[in-house]
C-alpha cells in the first residue's frame, strides 16, 4: 500500500456521461498530480495541485476538471465522456509540490480504470 | 516540448539473463531522471539520478546517467520472474518555476522461467 488512495478502482459508464474520480494523498503530502495512461501510452500528465491551488496544467481536456480540497484530497471530474477517454487514471502525491530543486519523487495510487462504452 | 524516449519497447529474456534498458531525453532545464517499475498497477519508485556518471544501485538493479549524451540506462542482472514489469523513465525539468515530470512510454520486460 503506497499510502495514496484512489476510488473507485473500476468504473464502467456510457458515452456522454460524467464521472468523478477521487484521490487521498499520502499523509503529509501537499501536492496531488493526475495522470492518464491509455493502452500502449505513457503516463500523460493532466494537472497538479499544491495545497489547494492549481500549480501546473498538462494535456487536460476542457471536458475534464479537477480540484483539491482543504483536507488535501482531490477529485478529477470527467464529463461528456467519449470512448477515447477509457484509460487508467492515476493520482500521485508528493511532499514538496515541485518547487524544490532536484527530484520530486511521486508516490502513485493504484489507479482508477475507466471504461467508456 | 520535452521528450523522453525509451528503448526497447519490449524485451523478453530468460530467467538469469542480464538486461539493459535505455532512456534518452531532450528537455530544457534538466533537474533529474527517475526510474519507476510498474507491475499490475501503480508505478513504484526505483531510482533518482541527478549527477552524471554516478551509479545508483539497489540489489540486482543499477542505473547510471550521462548528462552529456542525455541518456540513462537501467541494468538488471540475474533476472527473476518478479522483474517482469513495465519500466518507466521520467525526466524532471524546471518549467516556469516548477518542476515538471515527463514520462517515457516504458519498456515492457518479460522474464521467462
Image (cartoon, coloured by chain):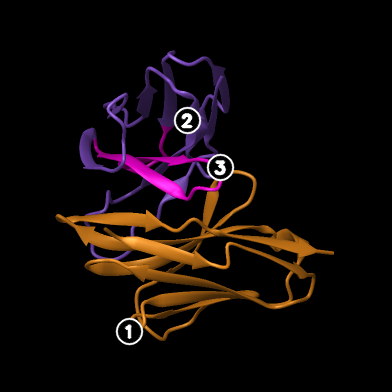
What residue is shown with label 3?
A39
- Tell me which chain appears orange: B
The disc numbered 2 marks a residue on which chain? Answer: A
Q: Start and end of the magenta stretch? A: A24-51
Q: Earlier in the sequence, mark 3 or mark 2?
A: 3
What residue is shown with label 1?
B68
Circle 3 Cα neighbour tier, 10 Å, few/some/many (<14 / 14–19 / ≥20) = few
What residue is shown with label 2?
A84
Kindly indicate whether the residue at mark 3 contacts the one at mark 1 (C-beta within 8 angstroms). Answer: no
| Quadrant in the rendering for residue B60 | bottom right
For image coordinates 41% across by 37% down, the residue present is A25
Do the residues marked 1 and 3 share a common chain? no
| 3D distance between C-alphas at marks 3 and 2 | 10 Å
In the displayed structure, does residue B111 sit left or right of residue A62? right
| Quadrant in the rendering for residue B37 | bottom right
Q: Is residue B75 above or below residue B84?
A: below
Amino acid at each position: 500500500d503506497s499510502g495514496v488512495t484512489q476510488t473507485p478502482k473500476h468504473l464502467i459508464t456510457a458515452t456522454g456521461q460524467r464521472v468523478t474520480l477521487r484521490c487521498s494523498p499520502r499523509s503529509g503530502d501537499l501536492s496531488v498530480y493526475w495522470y492518464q495512461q491509455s493502452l500502449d501510452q505513457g503516463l500523460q500528465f493532466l494537472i497538479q495541485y499544491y495545497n489547494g491551488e492549481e500549480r501546473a496544467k498538462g494535456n487536460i481536456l476542457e471536458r475534464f476538471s479537477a480540484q483539491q480540497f482543504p483536507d488535501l484530497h482531490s477529485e478529477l471530474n470527467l464529463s461528456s465522456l467519449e470512448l477515447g477517454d477509457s484509460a487508467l487514471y492515476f493520482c500521485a502525491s508528493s511532499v514538496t509540490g515541485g518547487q524544490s530543486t532536484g527530484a520530486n519523487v511521486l508516490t502513485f495510487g493504484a489507479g482508477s480504470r475507466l471504461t467508456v462504452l | 516540448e520535452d521528450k523522453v524516449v525509451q528503448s526497447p519497447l519490449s524485451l523478453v529474456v530468460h530467467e538469469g539473463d542480464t538486461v539493459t534498458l535505455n532512456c534518452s531525453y531532450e528537455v530544457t532545464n534538466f533537474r533529474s531522471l527517475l526510474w519507476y517499475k510498474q507491475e499490475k498497477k501503480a508505478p513504484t519508485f526505483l531510482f533518482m539520478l541527478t549527477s552524471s556518471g554516478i551509479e545508483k544501485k539497489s540489489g540486482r538493479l543499477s542505473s547510471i546517467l550521462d548528462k552529456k549524451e542525455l541518456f540513462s540506462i537501467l541494468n538488471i542482472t540475474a533476472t527473476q520472474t518478479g522483474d517482469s514489469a513495465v519500466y518507466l523513465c521520467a525526466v524532471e525539468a524546471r518549467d516556469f518555476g516548477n518542476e515538471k515530470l515527463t514520462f517515457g512510454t516504458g519498456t515492457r520486460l518479460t522474464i521467462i522461467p
